[in-house]
Structures are given as structure tokens and as C-alpha cells.
Image (cartoon, rainbow, N blue to C red):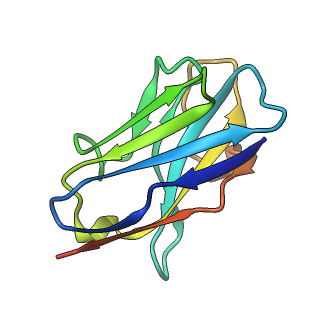
Amino acid sequence: VQLQACGGGSVQAGGCLRLSCVASGRTQPRYAMAWFRQAPGKERDFVGGISWSGGTTLYADSVKGRFTISRDNAKDTVSLQMNNLKPDDTAKYYCAARYSASETVVGREKNYSSWGQGTEVTVSS
């Protein structure tokens, strides 16, 4: 499956952005999706994930209450609504997919087999 992310940009602290990721190609009927991010000079970290049905979500503690992940299976799209952005949220954001028929969402990078090209998010203070 190919993933295309968009929606990044530059905002001031307290602002919001919405990222979207569209899946194409031979998409499996059931695949979990997730967002990861990588700040300059740092490792790539899990941000949030959603099960194939959309019924289960998982977030990193640093974004709980501010970020919301959702999906539209009819459009093969997953979104990340980011509110109350902070300078520490500045990073390149990647969407990822893994085939999974369960409702379990995992935050380990190695479990995801398909990756998008990333989109930049910059939050200024």
C-alpha cells in the first residue's frame, strides 16, 4: 500500500493543523494506521494510532487531549487533528500502515510495514 500525507505547515503556539493520509494501491481490507513524528536530531516517535475499524485509538502521553486521530475507510483516509500545538510538536510527521485484523493498536515503529513520505509541522512560540 502507498501512503500520501499532506496538511503540514507552520503555525503559532496554540494553533491547530489537520494532517491527512490517503492510502492507495492494493490496500488490505483490514489495516491499522498510525502517525509518527521525528524532530531534528531525534528518533522517530509514535504519536497516535487507530485500528482498522476506527473503534480503538492509542495516543502518546505528550499529545493526549490535544490530538485526535480518525479514519474514513470509504475514502482510505486517516486524519490527525492537532489542537493547542506547542513548539515541542515541531517535527516531520509520518503516516504508517500495518495489516491487522484485531482491534489492538501498537506504537512500535517496527510493526508498521508501509510508510508515507512525511509532512513538516513547525510550531513557533
Nearer the observer, 115 or 24:
24
Indicate the position of residue 55 as horizontal and vertical percent values.
47, 17
Q: Is residue 35 left or right of residue 63?
A: right
Residue 78 relative to residue 14: left or right:
right
Viewer-nearest residue: 99 or 7: 7
- 121 or 57: nearer the viewer: 121
Residue 31 to residue 82: above or below: above
Q: Is residue 121 above or below residue 58?
A: below
Image-based side of 65 in relation to 60, left or right: left
At a point 25% along the width and 71% down the height, the residue shown is 87
Q: Residue at point 52% right, 63% down?
A: 119
- Dividing the picture into quarters, in which one does residue 122 lie? bottom left
Picture coordinates of residue 83 (x, y %)?
23, 49
Count the marks. Answer: 0
Left or right: 30 as drawn, with respect to 80: right
Q: What quarter of the picture does the C terminus occupy?
A: bottom left
| Identity of the residue furthest to the bottom in this view | 41
- On the image, which quarter does residue 12 sit in? bottom left
